[in-house]
Image (spheres, coloured by chain):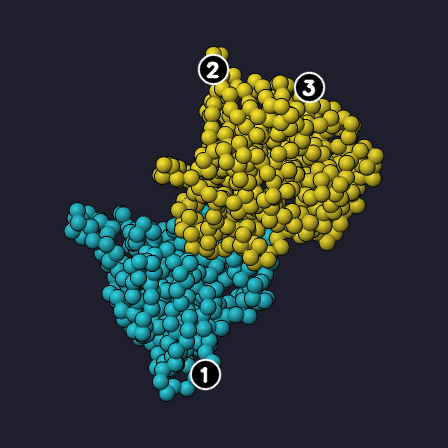
Amino acid sequence: MSKVVKAKYTAEAVSGFNHRTAMEEAARCLLCHDAPCSQGCPAGTDPAKFIRSIRFRNVKGAAETIRENNVLGGTCARVCPYDRLCEEACSRCGIDRPIEIGKLQRYAIEQEEVFGMQTLKAPADKKAGKAACIGAGPASLACAAELAKAGYDVTVLEREAKAGGVLTYGIVPSRLPQAVVDHDIAQVEALGVKFEFGKDVKEADTEGYDAVFIGTGLWGTKIPDIEGKDLKGVYAAADFLKAARTTGEGFDPGKKVIVVGGGDVTVDCAVTAKLLGAEDVKIVYRRTLEEAPGNMTEFQYALQLGIGITTGMAPAAVKGSGKVEKAVFKGFRDEGASLELSADTIVFATGQGPEDMTKVVPVTVTDKGMIAAGEDGAAGGKFFAAGDIVNGGKTVVEAVAAGKEAAASMIAYLEKKGVN
Amino acid sequence: MAVKKDLSINYLGVECENPFFLSSSPVGSNYEMVAKCFETGWGGVFYKTVGIFVADECSPRFDQTNKEGLPWLGFKNMEQISDKPTELNFENMRKLKRAYPEKIMVASIMGSTEQEWKDLAKMAEQAEADLIEGNFSCPQMTSHAMGSDVGTNPELVKSYSKAVTSVTDIPFIAKMTPNITNMEVPAIAAIEGGAASVSAINTVKSITNIDFENMTGMPVVNGKSSISGYSGAAVKPIALRFIAQMLQNEKLKDLEISGIGGIETWRDCAEFLALGCRNLQVTTAIMQYGYRIVEDMANGLMHFMDERGYNKLEDFIGLALGNIIPAEDLNRDFKILPKFDDNKCIGCGRCYISCYDAAHQAIDWNAETRRPELNDNCVGCHLCLNVCPVQECITPGEIKWKDGREQVDIALKHHYD
């Protein structure tokens, strides 16, 4: 019988390093010239530098490097797809296996909290310009932090009751504990960034600001147009994860849960269901694992929890009287194949789409509804945008990178406008 | 950088932006190298030793010792003083001083006669060096008139120091060899000869490894090898010992010693400073990792000062020196029993093995629970604590006073990394 891992919904799945084990791991680092890991980080977190600091017993310096380069350093340490970024680039792969960069980053940020460090400080000289960031997700937080560091007055306008966006409402806490997100957000707050919650922004709300950043993410849900999609027990991934995050341990995911999709969000939904007490959880994906956008480490974690993964089957119908009882799948490429599974809950993690952004602010959108912004984030006039609402849904670290980039453009714009 | 602390220090009358200097060695042997080290943040350089003698080097010339996969515990170097023309070296020093006036140039020199020492000192002065170091201690020289044999001979140390200080007013630092029982003797001789201070330690005479292919030492030069200098992390304890002994000598207590020996991290720097050094020299760690290590030395030292409320290096220089006391003066009235954390314990039994085979058979092994159990044999030696692989699993516990001894307040160490 296979050994299945038992875990709690809110307990972090992977344990971190202590001082000794962190030193052992840092000692494995080759301290390369032109370190490929640092070149592999979209947000410029500079792992080569912070690992070198740990290696030379300067843990505070390591935390400083991370925080100065990536305001969401604690979060990224948990959710970054390392195996595709810095760790894949690691020279140590040529000897045995890469340095556990994410885990070292986590260690440094944990020590930052232990030491009560406050690395980021707003300059004493304030600038006249006022900026707003719509949405309190990764791109917006990164943008707000950069603007505040430059001395601007920044307000984040958020629809929900808490900051964090997808970090707070869309990721399973065993992968990203809320305390980690809150600690990162506290760094943004320490820069003097103001937050207004419960704010469904309209264009009029942006009037008092010299520059406005839009980082609203993708919260429009996509459920395939199939029979039974409106039955009770059918969820879109974002709604399912948000309901679980806001309810916590008391959330009832149902006994038999099917999650449809092949991304990290799919795994998050399946893990959420399993950790909250579902007896039988299955992931069903229409393509092959090789084609799946999700991280292999995440799929492996799902397997460890005893979650089944079925590929090659696409959803065809949801059946039941009043509530979900069964899900029907057809072969995606194998036309003759069919599958019928009984279920209490079906979660569609088949991608999220944009809400109608033109109703919020005067921006142009692409045919897919994303904001048409340049690589520098410019979206026309005083408006700038970055993150999922521009790129169609990528990683947290890419949102941080894009948010930083947009902030640089906004600063240039504000300087040109003369509100310094 | 979030933390900013003043690392500047006056060393022998010379204002230094920080105490981090390259020691006289392969790491600072031409213009480009020293320029790069200055750009990286080093406060000064002891330029590779210059003599009238120009070295003729062997190949290969380095070896290193390691233990259980950890390389460079110690490092062996057979390279001698500079193999570049004497004039070129002094010309480089002058150009560097002019290009980087705020950085400190120390000319390290080595003569084989009094006249050579005088000539070299004059050349250093003409090269506009801020300080001069006399290399009395290189263990790999090919002549007994130069190198560490000189450093073990107080008469020679004194007369050569006198030769240098008779021709120049530039403060002179005598570099000490550890290949001696009492370093105070040559150090006092140097001061009597007019030296302003000493630097310690140069490398330790060594044979690092025996090569069985050639039945000789490492490195192998045409099937042979030689005894030569050992450096790096392994020699730090030896350096700290000599420095403490010199600074505790009545005649040497006010010396502004330049500390050398296995410095790699800000922590090593803080240790040498806490013992009383006012200047720090580094080579081996640079050979392994490059000049960039100074970044974490500076930043880490600033964080250390910030944490402890120190504003300048003087706030903690020498604080540890008075607490190094003769063994007979230690309080021997108590023992501290180790405390075992059964939850952190992973059941490896290493504490049991070491205690039985190398200490006092004070740990019983509970084979059922796979946990150590302390018995009455314990003398509080803490071998178990030192061998335990788990962080803070075995820690200092109960204090037991020996029968009839006076119980007083004692200072304890609580945290082990």
- Name the subunit of mark 3: A
Count of labels in the image: 3
Q: Say which chain is cyan.
A: B
Reading the image, the residue beneath label 2 is A337
**Mark 3 surroundings within 10 Å by alpha-carbon count, few (fewer than 14), some (14 through 19), many (20 or more):** few
- Labels 3 and 2: the sequence-earlier one: 2
Vertical comparison of A187 with A158: above or below:
below
Residue B93, visible in the rendered structure: no
Residue A241 placement (x, y as % from top left): 61, 36
Which-is-in-front pick, marks 2 and 1? 2
Residue under the point 58% across and 47% down: A180
The circle on residue A367 is: 3
In-image side of A15 versus B74 (left or right): right
In front: B178, or B195? B178
Alpha carbon separation for disc pair 3 and 2: 34 Å
In the image, which disc is placed on residue B408? 1
Q: At 51% from the left edge and 24% from the top edge, which residue is drawn?
A: A341
A346 lies above or below B298: above
The image shows residue B80 at horizontal and vertical percentages of 31, 56
Q: Amino acid at mark 1?
A: Val
**Element on which disc 1 rests:** loop
Residue B417 versus residue A160: which sits nearer the camera?
Answer: A160
Marks 2/1 same chain:
no
Colour in which chain A is drawn: yellow
In the rendered image, the residue lying farthest to the top is A336
Residue A342 seen in this snapshot: yes
Residue A8 located left or right of residue B50:
right
Q: Looking at the image, which is closer to me, B129 or A67?
A: A67
